[in-house]
Amino acid sequence: MTYEAMQEKLKTRLKATRFAHSMGVADAAVFLAKRFNVDTNKARIAGLLHDCARQYPNDRLIFEARKRNITFGAVEESMPLLLHGYIGAQLIKEEYDVDDEAIAQAIYRHTVGGANMTDLDKIIYFADMIEPGRNYPAVEHLRNLAKIASLNEMVLAGLSQSIEFVLQKGHLIHPDTVIARNEILLLNHENK
């Protein structure tokens, strides 16, 4: 399936605002991929399709995950929205003919991060936070980091911002977010 065909199909499955967000993430992902010498085609596809499972309402995500034999824990059970990345990682193959493990993994991890994140994983995670339609207090700071900071510095700031946001909301913090943040901190410590 061509990128344009993916766009057209996605446009029919998502609300207009979610589709616009997906286009913005694709553009931000390409910008970051160029900056950090990562495959721009993979970044563009992963950015476009990262929220493809948002075609399902939140109350259906647990059913869709179980239907695909996706394992998940208590955090996802209590916050089913977190499952959309896991489902999307399989949906890209089912509905968009994308059979690429790197793209699938980046989509799987785009919401909460994870252990041993690849550069593509980090780019999609961060592009989702800074795309042009996002509007929250720290977004301009993160957008500025996208232009000047290293990939790990950017993602560390993004993970920290995400944890702060979740804490303020009084929600559970996904262990994969903590793992991803700690790995970058440890890597930075080792490199000093």
Image (spheres, rainbow, N blue to C red):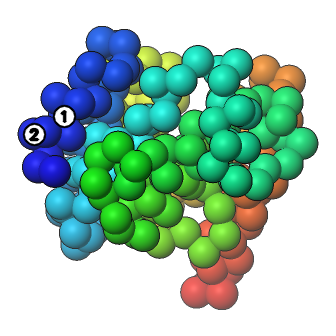
Residue 17 to residue 52: above or below: above
Question: Which sits in the foreground, 76 or 179?
Answer: 76
Residue highlighted by disc 1: 7
Task: Classify mark 2: helix, strand or loop.
Answer: helix
Label 2: few (<14), some or many (≥20) within 10 Å?
few
Q: Residue 169 in the image: state x and y as whole percent.
A: 78, 21
Instruction: Please state if 93 lies on the left or on the right of 56 as rendered.
Output: left
Label 1: few (<14), some or many (≥20) within 10 Å?
some
What numbered label is drawn on residue 74? none
Can residue 162 be seen in the rendering of this structure?
no
The residue at the point 13 percent across, 39 percent down is: 5
Residue highlighted by disc 2: 4
Residue 128 to residue 31: above or below: above
Whole-angstrom CA distance, mark 2 to mark 1, is 5 Å
Q: Hey, which residue is sitting farthest top in the picture?
A: 16
Q: To which quarter of the image does residue 132 belong?
A: top left
Question: Which sits in the foreground, 189 or 89?
Answer: 89
Amino acid at the residue labelled 1: Gln
Q: Residue 50 in the image: state x and y as whole percent.
A: 41, 43
Instruction: Please state if 140 lies on the left or on the right of 168 as rendered.
Output: left
The residue at the point 66 percent across, 24 percent down is: 60
Q: Residue 142 in the image: state x and y as whole percent.
A: 43, 40
Amino acid at the residue labelled 2: Glu
Q: Hey, which residue is sitting farthest right in the picture?
A: 74
The residue at the point 23 percent across, 51 percent down is: 44
